[in-house]
Image (cartoon, helix red, strand yellow):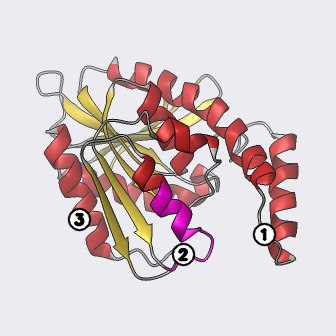
Amino acid sequence: MHITSEQRLDDGVRERAFTLGDIPGFLWTPGSASASGPVPLILLGHPTLGLARMYPRLAARARHSAAQGFATATIELPGCGDRPRWHAMEQTRAELRRTLQAGEPVGDELVDALILPLVDKAVPEWQAALDALLALPEIGGPVGYSGGVISIGIRLAAVEPRIAAAGLFAGSYVPRIMFEEARQVTIPLHVLLQWDDEGNDRQAALDLFDAFGAAEKTLEANMGGHTGVPQFAGEAAAQFFTRHLK
């Protein structure tokens, strides 16, 4: 991990931009974090819009988490932002746009082509980032994962034993094979569902929640579209991580 810039935000949060190989990312730590008092870590997932575009929302989530005593970190997803172009994925996204504009149903083959290669590439990168982050003296366990592409969260929760709890957003396409992986997820879960999400199959989201193998899992459903998540939903997620990471 190579730190490329550092600043103190006005609330005392320490923000560090870093690169891990050719992967850019950010790390935010509360002012209380130190080698003698390491803090738990939450990995901040995000959609495939690029870190530059997502930065304001990610930084706001990070500062809120820092106020609760958590460090947070995120990395750029494959083929996004300033990372090398991923031509196959760009073609698949173009096909998705054409399908939606034509008012046609999004078939399983398109969903698989859109999501599964991303999961296969992104999850090992998140694990490498976790290796580097937990090597820092001011970062300790346990670790949580929050938000982003839900299939990435499912795979991480299934294969990464260092993740102790996950908050997932049922707002993206999910390949059918991921339902099988969801049955392997046994850590505590907090799943957010926007009931009127125009881009999400509500029944599929409910079926996915049912498939999770966790003994403790909570589904919070709120009225409204994809971008209409109420503020109190964030408070509920924060309480979830406080219960399981502190």
Instruction: Determine which residue is flagged by label 1.
Output: 105
Residue 56 relative to residue 188: left or right: right
Instruction: Say which element carries label 3.
Output: helix
Instruction: Determine which residue is flagged by label 3.
Output: 235
Q: Position of residue 110 (x, y in %)?
A: 80, 53
Instruction: Name the front one of labels 3 and 2.
Output: 2
Q: What amino acid type should be assigned to the residue bearing mark 1?
A: Pro
Which residues make up the magenta segment? 196-207
Instruction: Determine which residue is flagged by label 2.
Output: 197
Residue 191 relative to residue 246: left or right: right
Q: Quadrant of residue 117?
A: top right
Q: Is there a contact, CB below 8 Å, between mark 2 and mark 1?
A: no
Q: What amino acid type should be assigned to the residue bearing mark 2?
A: Asp
Q: Residue at x 59, y 68 (%)?
A: 200
Instruction: Name the front one of labels 1 and 3.
Output: 1
Q: What amino acid type should be assigned to the residue bearing mark 3?
A: Glu
Binning the other alpha carbons within 10 Å of mark 3 as few (below 14), some (14 to 19) or many (20 upward) gives few
Q: Quadrant of residue 193?
A: bottom left
How many angstroms separate mark 1 from mark 3 (CA)?
Answer: 35 Å
Q: Residue at x 31, y 74 (%)?
A: 231
Instruction: Say which element carries label 2.
Output: loop
Q: Position of residue 31 (x, y in %)?
A: 19, 42
Magenta segment: does it hold 75? no
**Which of marks 3 and 1 precedes in the sequence?**
1
